[in-house]
Image (spheres, helix red, strand yellow):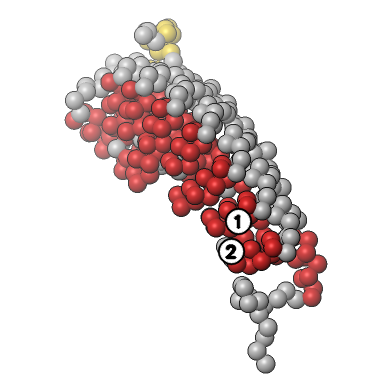
C-alpha cells in the first residue's frame, strides 16, 4: 500500500499526535508561503485564508520574505497582508529580505506601504541596518530613496554607517562594504558618529584592517585621533589586530593613518606589532620612517611618558 502524501509538498501528513501542535504553530497559508508554493497560496487565499494570522509568531508574509519568494510576497500583499506587522520576535517583513536576490521582495513591500524606518523591538534595527550588515547595496539604496533616516541608531547606538564599517572582515567582502559606505555618506551619514562604546566608524574599519575603507573615511574628514570609551584610537585598533590579520596587509592601514596625522598610539599594542618581524619589515620598507619611541630607556604608560623619574603628558 502506497502511503498518502500531500500533493503540494510531497510529504506525509502529520501524525494524529502532531495535529494539535500543527494547529497551534502554523497555518496552511504559512506553510505554502514558506515553501514558495504560489498555486497553493492562491487557492488558500481564494477560500479566504487570513493573510495576517501568525499562530507561530510569523505571518505568511514573514515566511515568504524570509524565503525570498517574490511571487508569494506580491500575492499576499494584493490580498491585504499587513507589510508592517511585527512577528513575535519584533521583526517586520522588511527586516527579513537579507540576501542579494531578495531586492524585489523589498521593492514590493515598500510599494505596498512598508515603513522603511520601522525599528525591530529588541535591537531597534531598521531595515537600513539590516541592509548595511549584509552588504545589500540595492536594498539600502531603495530605503534611502524612500526616506530612510541615514543616521538612525539601534539599541547599541550604531548607525548604518557604523554597522557597515564593522563588517568586511575578509578581503573578498571589503569592496562590497566600501561601496555601501560610499552610498551612506552620499546620503549624508555622519562620518564621526559614535556607538555606545564611543567607537567611530573609523575605529571599526581599523579593527578589520580595511585599508581602502579607512582611506575613504579619512578623505571624508573622519577624526583620525578619535578616542573610544577604553581610550583607544583608530591606530590602536589596527595595531591590536595586526599580528593575526597579515593577509589584510595592516601596514597599509597604519601608513595611511600616519599620513593623515595620527598621533595617539596605544603603546602595548605597538610593542606587540614591533615585535612581529613581518610587520616591522614592511613598515621599515615603506616610504614612511617610523620613529622608535621605545628607545633610550623611555617607558610609556597609557598616554603618559615616564622619563627621568617623572611623568609628563604626551605633547601634540
Query: Where residue 75 is drawn, which disc sits there?
Result: 1
Name above or below for residue 71 compared with residue 119. Answer: below
Tell me, yes or no, if residue 44 can be seen here.
yes
Element marked by disc 2? helix
> Split into 4 quadrants, where in the image is the C terminus?
top left
Q: Find out whether the residues at labels 2 and 1 contact each other: C-beta distance under 8 Å.
A: yes
Q: Residue at x 63, y 67 (%)?
A: 40
Query: Where residue 208 is drawn, which disc sits there?
Result: none
Question: Closest to the observer: 273 or 210?
Answer: 210
- Residue 286: x and y, percent? 20, 28
Q: Residue at x 33, y 22 (%)?
A: 219
Query: Where residue 38 is drawn, which disc sits there?
Result: 2
**Total numbered labels placed on residues in the image:** 2
Question: Closest to the observer: 236 or 151?
Answer: 151
Number of residues whose C-alpha sits closer than 10 Å to that of mark 2, classed few (under 14), some (14–19) or many (20 or more): some
- Residue 49: x and y, percent? 73, 60
Q: Residue at x 63, y 77 (%)?
A: 7
- Residue 228: x and y, percent? 50, 22
Give left or right: position of 92 versus 148.
right
* Spatial separation of the CA atoms under disc 2 and disc 1: 8 Å
Q: Earlier in the sequence, mark 2 or mark 1?
A: 2
* Residue 268, picture quadrant: top left
> Split into 4 quadrants, where in the image is the N terminus?
bottom right
* Residue 10, picture quadrant: bottom right
Element marked by disc 1? helix
Q: Residue furthest bottom?
A: 1
Tell me, yes or no, if residue 301 can be seen here.
no
Give left or right: position of 52 versus 263.
right
Question: Closest to the observer: 242 or 53?
Answer: 53
Amino acid at each position: 500500500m502506497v502511503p498518502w502524501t500531500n500533493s503540494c509538498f510531497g510529504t506525509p501528513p502529520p501524525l494524529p499526535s502532531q495535529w494539535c501542535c500543527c494547529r497551534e504553530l502554523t497555518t496552511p497559508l504559512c506553510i505554502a508561503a514558506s515553501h514558495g508554493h504560489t498555486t497553493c497560496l492562491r487557492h488558500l487565499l481564494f477560500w479566504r485564508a487570513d493573510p495576517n494570522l501568525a499562530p507561530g509568531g510569523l505571518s505568511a508574509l514573514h515566511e515568504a520574505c524570509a524565503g525570498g519568494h517574490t511571487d508569494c510576497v506580491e500575492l499576499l500583499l494584493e490580498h491585504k497582508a499587513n507589510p508592517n506587522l511585527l512577528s513575535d520576535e519584533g521583526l517586520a517583513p522588511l527586516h527579513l529580505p537579507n540576501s542579494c536576490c531578495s531586492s524585489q521582495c523589498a521593492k514590493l513591500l515598500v510599494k505596498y506601504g512598508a515603513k522603511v524606518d520601522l525599528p525591530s523591538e529588541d535591537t531597534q534595527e531598521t531595515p537600513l541596518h539590516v541592509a548595511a550588515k549584509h552588504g545589500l547595496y540595492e536594498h539600502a539604496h531603495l530605503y534611502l530613496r524612500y526616506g530612510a533616516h541615514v543616521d538612525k541608531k539601534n539599541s547599541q547606538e550604531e548607525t548604518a554607517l557604523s554597522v557597515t564599517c564593522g563588517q568586511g572582515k575578509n578581503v573578498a567582502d571589503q569592496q562590497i562594504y566600501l561601496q555601501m559606505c560610499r552610498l551612506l555618506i552620499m546620503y549624508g551619514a555622519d562620518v564621526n558618529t559614535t556607538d555606545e562604546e564611543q567607537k567611530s566608524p573609523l575605529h571599526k574599519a581599523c579593527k578589520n584592517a580595511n585599508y581602502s575603507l579607512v582611506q575613504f573615511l579619512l578623505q571624508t574628514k573622519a577624526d583620525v585621533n578619535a578616542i573610544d570609551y577604553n581610550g583607544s584610537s583608530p591606530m590602536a585598533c589596527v595595531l591590536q589586530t595586526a599580528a593575526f590579520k597579515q593577509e589584510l596587509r595592516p601596514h597599509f592601514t597604519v601608513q595611511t593613518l600616519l599620513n593623515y596625522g595620527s598621533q595617539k598610539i596605544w603603546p602595548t599594542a605597538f610593542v606587540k606589532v614591533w615585535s612581529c618581524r613581518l610587520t616591522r619589515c614592511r613598515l621599515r620598507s615603506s616610504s614612511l620612517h617610523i620613529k622608535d619611541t621605545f628607545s633610550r630607556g623611555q617607558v610609556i604608560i597609557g598616554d603618559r611618558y615616564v622619563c627621568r623619574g617623572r611623568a609628563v603628558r604626551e605633547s601634540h
